[in-house]
Image (spheres, rainbow, N blue to C red):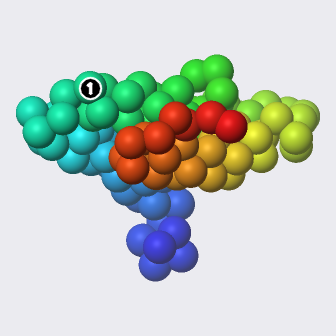
Amino acid sequence: MHRAFSEPLAVLTGDRLIIMAFEVLARVGPQDATRANHLILSLDRRSGMPNGICAGQGWESEAEVDLEAYHRSKTGALFIAATQMGAIAAGHEPEP
């Protein structure tokens, strides 16, 4: 997408998709409020600071990048969110 529409627009699209995920969870909340709350908190932890993709974005503005922290905060956070939220959605504990 970034090649077709520019990197800034691709970043904004990604940001919107994250917000949309919160919207989707909020809409299904009345069906199972406790589970929706756990899903929202999990998504929040992996998209915000200090261990989520926002932290990874922060690394991109640094002169020197700790690649391990960068990958853990971006790609790793998304994988963790996907697996933990899958477990939560299925009614299981998110860890281990």
The quadrant in which the C terminus is found is top right
Residue positioned 54% across, 76% down in the render: 3
Number of marks in picture: 1
Q: Using residue 88 as the reference point, say whether residue 22 is left or right of it.
A: left
Residue drawn at the location 49% of the way across and 47% of the way down: 87
- Say which quarter of the image contains residue 65: top right
Q: Residue furthest top?
A: 50
Query: In the rendered view, does 29 fall on the left or right side of 12?
Result: left
Query: Residue 75: percent from the left, percent from the top?
Result: 68, 51
Residue at (31% x, 46% y) in the render: 21
Quarter of the figure with residue 41: top left
- Amino acid type at image mark 1: Thr
SS for dot 1: helix
Above or below — where is 35 with respect to 78? above
Q: Is residue 81 visible?
A: no
**Direction from residue 71 to residue 66 in the image, left or right:** right
Q: Which residue is mark 1?
A: 34
Q: Residue furthest bottom?
A: 4
Mark 1 is surrounded, within 10 Å at the Cα level, by few (under 14), some (14 to 19) or many (20 or more) other residues, namely: few
Q: Residue furthest front?
A: 92
Residue 62 image offset from top left, x and y in percent: 79, 31
Residue 76 seen from this side: yes
At a point 47% along the width and 73% down the height, the residue shown is 1
Viewer-closest of 39 and 6? 39
Quick one: 82 or 51, which is closer to the camera?
Answer: 82
Image spot of residue 53 (x, y percent): 59, 39
